[in-house]
Amino acid sequence: MRERHFQPAPEWVVQQWFNTDKPLTLAALRGKVVVLEAFQMLCPGCVSHGLPQAQRVHQTFSSSEVVVVGLHTVFEHHEAMTPTALRAFLHEYRIPFPVGVDMPDGRNGVPQTMRAYDMRGTPTLILIDARGNLRQQHFGSISDLTLGAQIAELVLEAREDATGASATSAGSGADRSADDCASGACAIRMPNE
Amino acid sequence: MRERHFQPAPEWVVQQWFNTDKPLTLAALRGKVVVLEAFQMLCPGCVSHGLPQAQRVHQTFSSSEVVVVGLHTVFEHHEAMTPTALRAFLHEYRIPFPVGVDMPDGRNGVPQTMRAYDMRGTPTLILIDARGNLRQQHFGSISDLTLGAQIAELVLEAREDATGASATSAGSGADRSADDCASGACAIRMPNE
Amino acid sequence: MRERHFQPAPEWVVQQWFNTDKPLTLAALRGKVVVLEAFQMLCPGCVSHGLPQAQRVHQTFSSSEVVVVGLHTVFEHHEAMTPTALRAFLHEYRIPFPVGVDMPDGRNGVPQTMRAYDMRGTPTLILIDARGNLRQQHFGSISDLTLGAQIAELVLEAREDATGASATSAGSGADRSADDCASGACAIRMPNE
Amino acid sequence: MRERHFQPAPEWVVQQWFNTDKPLTLAALRGKVVVLEAFQMLCPGCVSHGLPQAQRVHQTFSSSEVVVVGLHTVFEHHEAMTPTALRAFLHEYRIPFPVGVDMPDGRNGVPQTMRAYDMRGTPTLILIDARGNLRQQHFGSISDLTLGAQIAELVLEAREDATGASATSAGSGADRSADDCASGACAIRMPNE
């Protein structure tokens, strides 16, 4: 039904992960909406706005539908924002979601994932749909009202995809999917709060 | 496709309107999502949270899809919160959207629309879908992230309804609907900002 | 010791008092620093900034040294901001300090005290020293840091006056004053918190 | 006149200074009120509350009377909060006042100045009067209203000291001092804003 064509989001290239037992790949998150928060630990706008907003998203939406991932995209002050310093930062700021360290370019420049997404700076908030397409990329701040609407759209698309997929399979399965969809689509339950 | 059954939202009963040339009826807003902000001008939570949030909704979403309406539901201090006082309040607080005065019950009690919706107090934020069904009713505060998601869900349903309707009609009409849908469904354009 | 000459603050002219059993006169408050918050109940800056700041002053400083008084200086929307409406407002916003209604001029213009002080609008915050002199008059907003400093200066002057006065009287009285002063002058105890 | 006895503030022991051409000693600041903000760059309360408040003090009071000094008292995550990382932090957060790095104890424990003041953690805000006495020490947050009052008290004491000193000297000097005092003591001019 959706005939629009979106670009696939580039796979991230990560040097080291925090807050997760095993490395995360974008490919493995297919089927979920991904909210990628690119930040630097010494970027004031990231600390005052971007990361708190990412935490609100993490608390508001169900982790079965929306996954929040941090990406430490160090493009300046490389000597200050080391993985060691990041570890302390994440601990002190109680960041609950997985955070990857964007792979350095080897010359203290823009790291590899940041370059692949052509990000203009930090904070950058990126929305990737359940099919793995890049759907939104915001540099700077975005209101919670707009962000909530954009995430919801991708969640609802994902539910529709899931329903459609089972609809092509047989009988009762489709019915159950329809039921799931019907119940799952209730706005009351979409956000956790 | 949606087989859920929702209750129709009661039509509001309004004594007097502000910020609109002619009275608004809920029936006439069919086809749009309605965000109804029930408030009292001397309710601190309405002034600090509810009305500013309603203004953000008014600014964020397109008025062709989402309509914000205020409802002055005076259930206490009737002698202080008269329509004359409300007029001054709306002017000083620069409220831009239409506001109706909920019809008094004639005994200085709970006004008629407030009673019909069984509201528990102010502020109460109510979401009514494009088919006129009551979908959400929040007493107190709700986060912008959750509200944005809930409004988006109703907007997307309304778009789907519009598309579905034309899909049942013939040929080129369906194609045009599909195009509208394709373009209209882009999250970038859904909120105005 | 202080040889500066300040203008005496005009006595306020009040139509009606709230939150006090008996009328307050400026004259009767001699010996205390008076923080006068002139406001209108439908003035957004008064509700969001001026009155909350006045409440913080009320909570922070000892009422034996600093008295906070509200003055409802209605110069517009007279029909909306009646004493009846003010009573409801003070109740809903939990204003704890005495509030006087500035005496109307009889022609729906600028009320009498507001005119006597030549105020430019609301909110206006006025500081009157313990001798009854007008010391500060701020239209609009002033930071808590600056306001705290200005109030402290007047409090310390008042303590000095009290000490100086008893120093001219005899013996043990002077000693007790000195003791009071010595203990009272400790910055730890000046604000209540 | 003031017969109270205060403890002299311990001289700070600093490994390295930022935002100043030459090392600062507490002794050399005699005659001015010193506001010492002890912080750690990865302490959330320091970043959200303590340092912004110190910046407001820096902007509000005249640097001829009140000096704001930061002290980086690293007692945890030593490997993350190095002087190199601090340099980047001060640059990104636009900290305008001098900041010293508290001298490590050599065992990754509590640094030397922090120990000398017996600080309980960060942020800690310390007020030192113009005579070099320790007058206030706040761990955690303190309101701007209270802080403004406490700083003002120390400023006024310093002015009194200055006046008193010249009053003991002869004739015209005393007169000039009195004039200075008279003009300097005006609350309007004490804070810069």
Image: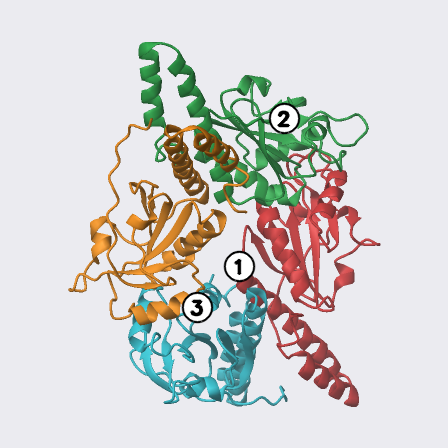
Chain colours: A cyan, B red, C green, D orange
Answer few, some or many: residues within 10 Å of disc 2's Cα (few below 14, many 20 plus, some between 14 and 19). Answer: many
Residue type at numbered disc 3: Glu
Residue B164 falls left or right of residue D35: right
| Residue A24 position within the rendered picture, expressed as x and y whole percent measured from the top left | 36, 83
Residue type at numbered disc 1: Ser
Answer few, some or many: residues within 10 Å of disc 1's Cα (few below 14, many 20 plus, some between 14 and 19). Answer: some
Residue A5 falls left or right of residue D132: right
Q: Which residue is mark 2?
A: C100
Please report, as a chain letter, where disc 3 is located. D
| Residue B61 position within the rendered picture, expressed as x and y whole percent measured from the top left | 67, 67
Q: Nearer the viewer, residue D17 or D165?
A: D165
Residue that lies at the very extreme toward the front in this rendered image: D171
| Residue A161 position within the rendered picture, expressed as x and y whole percent measured from the top left | 54, 83
Q: Nearer the viewer, residue A46 or B43?
A: A46
- Check if mark 2 and mark 3 are on a common chain: no
What is the CA distance from the residue labelled 1 to the residue labelled 2?
A: 38 Å
Please report, as a chain letter, where disc 2 is located. C
Q: Which residue is mark 3?
A: D92
Residue type at numbered disc 2: Gly
Q: Which residue is mark 1?
A: B143
